């Protein structure tokens, strides 16, 4: 699994959030959970999602994207709180 650093000019494909949710829930993939969540905390990450659900309408695979956004958003929030108290 490759971790990408996001910048202001990068557009995060919405399916990436669904992939992060899948990888984080798998026992083998959870080893890199912290790194994935920190990548989503950066510029262009999950906070850039407008929650307009336009992605649901155009998704050709009918993925449960809004559920993934909500689940990963909660994971990102918990990771941010953990990071806050670790420093």
Image (cartoon, rainbow, N blue to C red):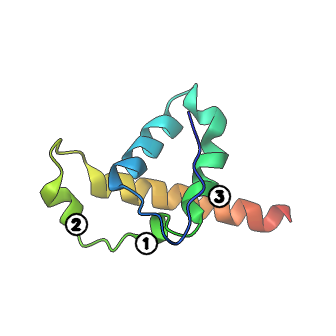
Determine whether, in the image, residue 17 is placed left or right of residue 87: left
Of pointers 2 and 3, the one earlier in the residue sequence = 2
Up-down relation of residue 47 to residue 79 (above or below): below
Looking at the rendered image, the quarter that the N terminus falls into is top right
**Which residue does the numbered mark 2 point to in the structure image?**
53
Q: Which residue matches tag 3?
A: 79
SS at circle 3: helix
In what element is the residue under mark 2?
loop
Residue 17 % position (x, y):
41, 51
Q: Secondary structure at mark 1?
A: helix
Residue under label 1, please give it.
Answer: 48
Residue 31 position by quadrant: top right
Query: Do the CB atoms of the residues marked 2 and 3 lie less than 8 Å apart?
Result: no
Graded by Cα atoms within 10 Å as few (under 14), some (14 to 19) or many (20 or more), the crowding at tag 1 reads some
Q: Position of residue 81 (x, y in %)?
A: 69, 65
**Position in image of residue 63 (x %, y %):** 23, 45
Q: Left or right of 22: which side holds 64?
A: left
User: Which callout, 1 or 3, points to the residue nearer the camera?
Assistant: 1
Graded by Cα atoms within 10 Å as few (under 14), some (14 to 19) or many (20 or more), the crowding at tag 2 reads few
Residue nearer the viewer, 39 or 8: 8
Q: Nearer the viewer, residue 23 or 15?
A: 15
């Amino acid at each position: 699994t490759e971790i990408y650093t996001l910048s202001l000019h990068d557009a995060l494909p919405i399916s990436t959030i669904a992939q992060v949710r899948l990888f984080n829930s798998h026992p083998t993939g959870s080893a890199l959970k912290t790194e994935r969540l920190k990548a989503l905390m950066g510029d262009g990450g999950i906070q850039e999602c407008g929650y307009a659900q336009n992605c649901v309408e155009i998704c050709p695979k009918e993925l449960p994207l809004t559920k993934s956004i909500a689940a990963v958003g909660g994971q990102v929030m918990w990771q941010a709180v953990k990071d806050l108290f670790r420093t």
